[in-house]
Image (cartoon, rainbow, N blue to C red):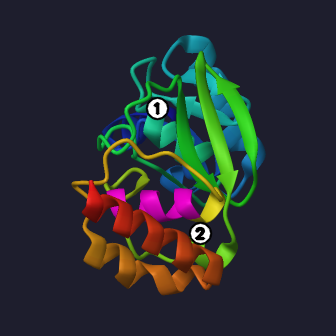
Amino acid sequence: MEKDLLAILLRSENTVFTFKDLSLIWNETNTGLVKKYAYRYVKMGKLYSIRKGVYAKDRNYDRLELANKIFTPAYETVLAREGVVFQKYDRIFVASYLTREVSCDGQLFAFRRIKNTVLLNASGIDNNGTYFIASKERAFLDTVYLNKSYHFDNLSSMNWEECFKLLPMYDNQAMVKRLNSYYKLSKNA
């Protein structure tokens, strides 16, 4: 039975697992038993312990997947990767239900609190199978929502129609003004 549990885990698409994930994958309601097996697999070198209650198949796990597992619900934002900002960041930015900076296994994660009506709205959020990630437009709007003033290096690739389509979910008049300013600025550039 125990070998079957490890085989089931290794066949999973996921690279990062919480106790809750392990319970679901193993179909085990006894949390004490789940913890016992997880501890045993870590000790045997079959699982890698990232932090308390969070495990990976090995050290080559997906850091974006980890970002979604530390605090749930959450999704990763993509402005630097999409070329909207040019600054090189040493942290992964994540929208979540709280604001925290977490260092985990040598990686910094910056969680930014966003109101639940926005956080739980799936518009502009992609599910790649193992974690959630914001579209460029959704990440841009989240940043505009969270910051009264923010410098974006490159807005030329922004799909403004999509931005204005997503805007009502924020229900924020000040943000409407800021978005219109960024739109005009991009058209004058």
Query: Which amino acid is tagged 2?
Result: Leu
Q: Residue at x 29, y 44 (%)?
A: 82
- Observer-nearest of 29 and 75: 75
Q: Position of residue 47 (x, y in %)?
A: 52, 23
Q: Residue at x 71, y 32 (%)?
A: 102
Q: Position of residue 14 (x, y in %)?
A: 39, 43
Q: Main secondary structure of the magenta part?
A: helix
The answer to whether marks 1 and 2 mark residues whose Cβ atoms lie closer than 8 Å is no
Q: Residues within 10 Å of mark 2 (few under 14, many from 20)?
A: many
Q: Is residue 107 visible?
A: yes
Dot 2 lies on which element?
A: helix
Q: Which mark is residue 119?
A: 2
Residue 163 among those drawn in magenta: no
- Observer-nearest of 31 and 108: 108
Q: How many marks?
A: 2
Which span of residues is magenta-colored?
A: 135-144
Mark positioned earlier in the residue sequence (1 or 2): 1
Q: Which mark is residue 63?
A: 1
Residue 141 among those drawn in magenta: yes
Q: Residues within 10 Å of mark 1 (few under 14, many from 20)?
A: some
- 61 to 1, vertically: above or below: above
- 140 to 110, vertically: above or below: below
Give the CA distance from mark 1 to mark 2: 20 Å
Query: Which amino acid is tagged 1?
Result: Arg
- Observer-nearest of 18 and 106: 106
Q: Residue at x 29, y 72 (%)?
A: 160
Where is residue 95, by image quadrant?
Answer: bottom right
Dot 1 lies on which element?
A: helix
Q: Position of residue 33 (x, y in %)?
A: 71, 42
